[in-house]
Image: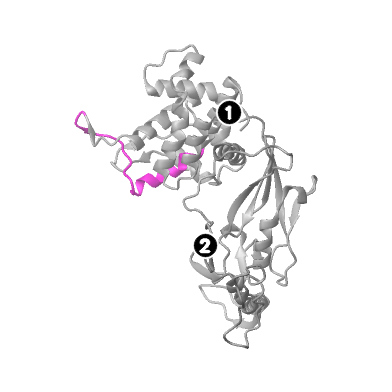
Amino acid sequence: MSVVMFQGLSHSMIMHPVLLGEPTLTRQALYYMAELDAAALISFDEGRGELSEEQIECLVDNYLFAYSKRHPESRVSFKVAQGKFSIEDSSDYYRHVDRGNTLALAIDSLNDPAVSFVEPVEKTDQVNLMDWNIGVNYVEKPFHAYRRAVGALLEKRVNTLIAPSHLRDGYIGRLRVLKPDNMLIDYQQAIELTEIRWRSILPDATQFQLAPSECRQVVDALPIERIEVSGLRSPILLSHYFSGLKERNPMKAFVGFYNVLEYYFEEAPLLLQRVATTERMQLQCLVELLVSEGDVANEVARLSPEESRMMCENMITSSGIEIQAFNPAAPSLRAELARWLYETRCAVVHSKKTRRGQPVAAFYPYSAHAKALRYVIPVLQWLTVACIEKDVSLNGSGPAP
């Protein structure tokens, strides 16, 4: 719900909300910003050369990692489950709209010498058939009437007289028929978002002005956020990081983030000149390499009340075995964090029903108990960010894409 401007790497990039798929039959008068897709546009204004698909992915991942550090709650990533664009066949009489679900007639009678004429079957149709985008043009006139009508509805009120009851307070006066939530824009504003370019925004601008609207309930500007990035992060670590970031399944998200930490399990003890004979000891060495005791205390204090409460309570797993709560009064917070994460990791990864004949802590897919992992993810994600940044300080940033 903002315009984000990235720079510092080989090419600048701007990310903004966008209405994709050219809605036609599915066109709406109004859209909520939170429901729109996001698009990133890489700038070649500096005169730098083209980038391969792999170089583009590397560039975008590095910028989005910086965005994720600032907004850890965001799941924005380069990866999408399904494309939003269609490849058109120039020999066809139709083009795809509505994300490929509708075929709209497209005949260029002005520039295609093979077209003798195009005229409406119903002579009352008031549509410019000289414009090639015929199917979409037929939608325009009824849509504009619909858009004005919906905008007018937002101003409607009714007079009310409601007696109080044990369920609610009474009310006398006028009430709005419809009350939109924040960040509402109209269709034309949404379409014009696709025209955002880096050079169209002044260097000191803090807001991006939207197109004017007949509807008074829509927003008129979007905040501008600027992010400066220096150096590239490890593509291996970023790949694991984003595999965890994009997952809504907390078990899969845990594994993706934990894979970032595993990358340094053998090297961390060597850097600390310590011997670690178990994975738990390796994890403890890595935690000590990445953060201080004060860092852990600050991170725990930063958590939401619900996250903090869940972290400091025993976690019941799907097998009924509990994982001992994180103890904020432990002599070493780093050792305690490593213990808590390692025991959680074992319950996520291991599928053993028993160990030496005894039941073990385990989270089962699709179980209600696995949902508790979502309270572990923020701390684990924070630690993975520290690991990726430590990798830069140890090995330097990677080459430009």
Residue 372: in magenta span: yes
Viewed as shown, does residue 7 lie left or right of 106? Answer: right
Hey, what amino acid is under mark 1?
Answer: Glu
Residue 185, position as x, y percentages in the image: 66, 64
Pointer 1 residue: 389
Pointer 2 residue: 99
Residue 243, position as x, y percentages in the image: 47, 40
- Quadrant (top left/top right/bottom left/bottom right) for the N terminus: bottom right
Q: Nearer the viewer, mark 1 or mark 2?
A: 2
Q: Can you name the residue that lies furthest to the top here?
A: 273
The residue that appears at 23% across and 34% down in the rendered structure is: 354
Of 138 and 191, which appears nearest the observer?
Answer: 138
Q: Earlier in the sequence, mark 1 or mark 2?
A: 2
The residue that appears at 55% across and 25% down in the rendered structure is: 391
For label 1, count other residues whose C-alpha is less than 10 Å away and answer few (under 14), some (14-19) or many (20+): some
- Whether tag 1 and tag 2 are in contact, CB under 8 A, the answer is no
Please provide the residue range marked out in magenta. Answer: 356-378
User: Is 51 drawn above or below residue 386 in the view shown?
Assistant: below
Specify whether residue 359 is in view.
yes
Of 118 and 51, which appears nearest the observer?
Answer: 118
Of 297 and 70, which appears nearest the observer?
Answer: 70
Specify whether residue 331 is in view.
no
Quadrant hosting residue 111:
bottom right
Q: Can you name the residue that lies furthest to the left here?
A: 357
Residue 213: in magenta span: no
User: Is 47 drawn above or below residue 211 in the view shown?
Assistant: above
Q: Look at the numbered disc 1 and give the secondary structure of its residue.
A: helix
Residue 92, position as x, y percentages in the image: 52, 66
Hey, what amino acid is under mark 2?
Answer: Arg
The residue that appears at 51% across and 15% down in the rendered structure is: 271
